Image (cartoon, rainbow, N blue to C red):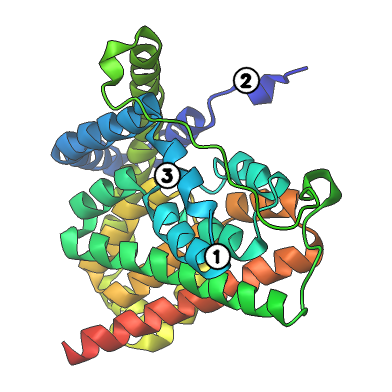
């Protein structure tokens, strides 16, 4: 039975709570915050509409089913393609769970699954557009490269650990793979690129636009309201001191990202505001990447499918991979 709390719209409640909180605590800030959020929404609206339509096209055309092609052939090949397709697939940390469960049941090796699992929540076509709009095209490309590198790193380390017989049977019994001589080929479905020729696909497109549009709108309002408060009350000199140009702030950014990361889209305006206040771009990458793969939703999703040692492996690879790409980006910025 669905409870009253379960039927409530949590993002709308959060918006109402922020607005009421500002009105009660800092009434003079309410009008500037609402104006800031409204202007920010107008500025990002073209990119928001583009990303919503792009996500709807992927869903309606069933292009996401091309993911099956990544999980065939030799393990090393699978790891490479899993990391690449994971970064291009439209799945969040929770949405990827049924895909991963199906791959496990099909007998796909753990290494490519881990590569896909790491890279998928960090980047997708919609996230790329929104990141470019908020933080610039260069940063969007860097984050895409980081997603692929983390996937390759996680898949490569996992493959080495499996071959060395240091890890085995990390999946829970409910999703244990079928016994077979090798990985089975995932069933691929042919995409419908001209989705408008099918009534069913057109319906999927419209439903996706409505669902994603409502999702993005609420989270963007929350993010811009919080950014308005951050801009108004967070001293720029403090941000520069804590999260400035040095690499020492990268561990702090990753640590903060674990409990505080909302979702990839809501985080973008907040990170953009922090960069404007003096935060290093390498630290921004650390927060977005580390938070993306170790956020509470991501950890819950992983815990649902793997045993404790598998969960520990995921977390270790996520954190170490985040350190790897963040410090590499900091070094790149230093010599640029």
Q: Position of residue 18 (x, y in %)?
A: 43, 39
First in sequence: mark 3 or mark 1?
3
Residue 43's label in the rendered image is none
Task: Give the vertical position of 64 relative to 200 (above or below).
Answer: below
Name the secondary structure under disc 3: helix
Secondary structure beneath label 1? loop
Cα distance between the residues tagged 3 and 1: 60 Å
The answer to which image quadrant residue 60 occupies is top left
Disc with the residue nearer the chain's start (2 vs 1): 2
Q: Nearer the viewer's eye, disc 3 or disc 1?
A: 1
User: Which of the two labelled residues, at mark 3 and mark 2, occupies the earlier sequence position?
Assistant: 2
> Which residue corresponds to the image point at 41% horizontal and 46% vertical from the top-left?
89
Q: In this view, does 243 lie above or below 139?
A: below
Q: Which of 32/305 is in front?
A: 305
Residue sitting at the far bottom: 335
Task: Give the labeled residue for mark 3.
Answer: 25
Looking at the image, can residue 287 be seen?
yes
Indicate left or right for 251 with 174 as reference.
left
Q: Which mark is residue 7?
A: 2
Q: How far apart are marks 2 and 1 (CA)?
A: 46 Å
- Mark 1 closeness class: few <14, some 14–19, many ≥20 residues within 10 Å: few
> Residue 158, how many percent across, how many down?
63, 73
Badge 2 local density, few (<14 within 10 Å), some, or many (20+)?
few
* Residue for point 58% across, 43% down: 186
**Is residue 260 in view from this perspective?**
no
* Drawn side of residue 283 relative to residue 196, left or right: right
Identify residue for label 1: 74
2 or 1: mark nearer the eye? 1
User: Helix, strand or loop at disc 2?
Assistant: helix
Q: In which quarter of the image is the N terminus?
A: top right
Residue 174 at x, y percent in the picture: 83, 44
């Amino acid at each position: 039975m669905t409870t009253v709390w379960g039927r409530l719209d949590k993002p709308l409640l959060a918006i109402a709570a922020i607005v009421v909180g500002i009105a009660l605590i800092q009434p003079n800030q309410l009008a500037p915050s609402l104006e800031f959020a409204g202007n920010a929404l107008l500025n990002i609206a073209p990119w928001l509409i583009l990303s919503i339509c792009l996500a709807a096209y992927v869903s309606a055309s069933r292009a996401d089913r091309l993911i099956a092609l990544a999980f065939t052939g030799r393990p090393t090949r699978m790891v490479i393609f899993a990391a690449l397709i994971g970064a291009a697939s439209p799945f969040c940390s929770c949405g990827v769970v049924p895909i991963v469960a199906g791959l496990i049941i099909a007998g796909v090796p753990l290494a490519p699954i881990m590569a896909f699992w790491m890279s998928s929540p960090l980047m997708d076509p919609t996230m790329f557009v929104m990141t470019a709009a908020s933080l610039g095209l260069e940063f969007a490309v860097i984050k895409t490269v980081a997603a692929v590198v983390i996937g390759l790193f996680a898949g490569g380390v996992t493959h080495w650990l499996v071959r060395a017989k240091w890890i085995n049977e990390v999946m829970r019994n409910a999703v244990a793979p079928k016994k077979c001589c090798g990985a089975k080929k995932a069933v691929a479905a042919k995409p419908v690129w001209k989705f408008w020729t099918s009534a069913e696909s057109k319906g999927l497109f419209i439903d996706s636009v409505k669902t994603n549009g409502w999702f993005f709108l609420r989270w963007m309002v929350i993010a811009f309201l919080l950014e308005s408060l951050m801009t108004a009350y967070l001293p720029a000199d403090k941000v520069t001191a804590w999260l400035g140009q040095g690499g020492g702030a990268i561990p702090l950014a990753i640590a903060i990202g674990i409990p505080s990361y909302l979702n990839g889209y809501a985080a973008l305006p907040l990170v953009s505001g922090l960069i404007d206040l003096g935060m290093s771009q390498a630290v921004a990458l650390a927060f977005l990447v580390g938070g993306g793969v170790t956020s509470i939703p991501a950890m819950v999703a992983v815990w649902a499918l793997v045993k404790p040692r598998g969960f520990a492996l995921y977390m270790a690879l996520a954190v170490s991979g985040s350190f790897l790409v963040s410090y590499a980006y900091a070094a790149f910025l230093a010599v640029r």
